Image (tube, grey):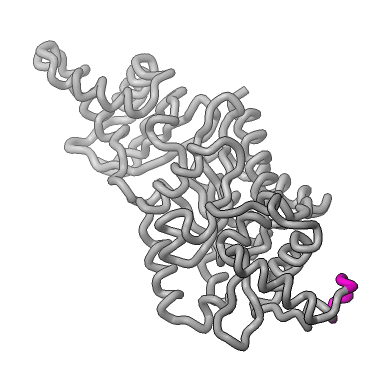
């Protein structure tokens, strides 16, 4: 990982923090003259150049070419995030806007998570990503089946946290309203309190039992349940929600480099890969910040991700975060991601209580 800021004297720490902040704001390599004009340092440009050269020798800074100023390395950003930055908490107005929008959304899972993602993207100016609860985390409270057309059934699954997931399925035969009411009651009685993964396994086992051959009502219930609780294909829509991809067009890192922009859009389109990235973030306690070379995704896209878990308080359901250039405003974005995560978790606890 390289040296930490603790090896630096106070002046070098201040210089490193100032270079990172200046580069985040301008996206232009930072020169000693630029720092001198800022008026923060009572040092000559030559002294600042020497301090910046020392930071470069230690791996905290680098420069794009011989005559340029310095830019932070991944180590420089990491040290800034871990040890040097002063976070800027969301304003009361921002907190109120987050709470109002997230808590006013109905409990339908897809709409609920899309709203949280849109709010986070708008508040940060970055791409927001949210992983939806997978089958291992969604615990069923009830299921409701409704006929909407011939051989088409609307499935409404309600989790123990109060979130609602809906899907439209096609059936091999047509069902009446009373039939579906009866099957809904039976599936709820048999599978409430179980995760979708457990339900899927129980349905497969049940369909292979001999008694199914002699009980038509049971066969219909199990077969319809198998379709109702089928899991989406890995990487399919619904596992991760992405909002604000257009923000990448406004970033100098991508606006001037079409190939970098293509790589980023391709990576954001690989939903299974995003799910894995967010799952890796959930393996870390608390909020996660992944910078540049620290993961294959961020290394390939020259980006960073800030992500936090959300859930019911007692159980983690997924992760929410932002993806942007390594030059993102960590001091503002880190507390913003934490705030949206807190609001999500509070809402889910209220839904489940």
In the image, residue 206 lies at what x, y percent?
Answer: 20, 18
- 143 sits left or right of 6 in the view: left
Q: Name the residue located 46 percent from the left edge and 23 percent from the top edge.
A: 141
What residue lies at 47% left-to-right and 46% top-to-bottom?
Answer: 278
- On screen, residue 23 versus residue 326, left or right, reads right
Eyeballing the image, is 135 above or below 255? above
In magenta, the rendered stretch is 37-42
Q: Is residue 336 visible?
A: no
Q: Residue at x 44, y 49 (%)?
A: 277
The reply to whether residue 131 is visible in this rendering is: yes
The chief SS type of the magenta part is loop
Residue at position x 44%, y 54% in the image: 295
Q: Is 275 inside the magenta-drawn segment?
A: no
* Total numbered labels placed on residues in the image: 0
* 67 relative to 271, above or below: below
| 145 is higher (above) or lower (below) than 334 | above
């Amino acid at each position: 990982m390289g040296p930490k800021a603790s090896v630096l004297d106070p002046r070098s720490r201040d210089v490193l923090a100032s270079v990172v902040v200046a580069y985040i704001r301008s996206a232009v390599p930072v020169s000693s003259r630029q720092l001198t004009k800022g008026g923060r340092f009572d040092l000559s440009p030559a002294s600042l150049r020497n301090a910046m050269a020392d930071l470069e020798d230690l791996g905290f800074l680098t420069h794009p070419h011989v005559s340029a100023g310095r830019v932070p390395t991944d180590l420089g950003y990491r040290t800034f995030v871990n040890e040097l930055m002063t976070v800027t908490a969301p304003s009361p107005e921002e907190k109120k806007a987050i709470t109002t929008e997230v808590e006013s959304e109905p409990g339908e899972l897809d709409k609920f998570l899309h709203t949280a993602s849109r709010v986070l993207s708008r508040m940060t100016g970055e791409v927001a990503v949210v992983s939806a609860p997978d089958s291992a985390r969604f615990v069923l409270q009830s299921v409701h089946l409704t006929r909407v057309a011939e051989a088409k059934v609307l499935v409404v699954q309600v989790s123990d946290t109060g979130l609602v997931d809906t899907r439209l399925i096609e059936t091999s035969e047509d069902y009446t309203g009373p039939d579906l009411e009866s099957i809904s009651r039976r599936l709820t009685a048999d599978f409430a309190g179980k995760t979708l993964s457990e339900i899927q396994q129980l349905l497969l086992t049940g369909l292979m039992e001999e008694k199914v051959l002699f009980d038509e009502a049971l066969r219909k219930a199990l077969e319809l349940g198998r379709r109702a609780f089928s899991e989406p294909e890995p990487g399919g829509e619904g596992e991760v929600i992405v909002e604000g991809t257009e923000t990448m067009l406004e970033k100098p890192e991508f606006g001037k480099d079409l190939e970098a922009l293509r790589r980023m859009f391709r990576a954001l389109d690989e939903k299974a890969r995003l799910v894995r990235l967010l799952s890796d973030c959930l393996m870390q306690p608390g909020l996660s910040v992944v910078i540049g070379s620290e993961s294959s995704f961020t290394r390939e896209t020259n980006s960073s991700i800030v992500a936090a878990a959300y859930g019911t308080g007692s159980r983690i359901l997924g992760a929410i975060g932002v993806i942007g250039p390594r030059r993102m405003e960590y001091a503002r974005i880190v507390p913003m991601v934490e705030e949206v995560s807190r609001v999500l978790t509070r809402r889910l606890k209220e839904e489940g209580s």
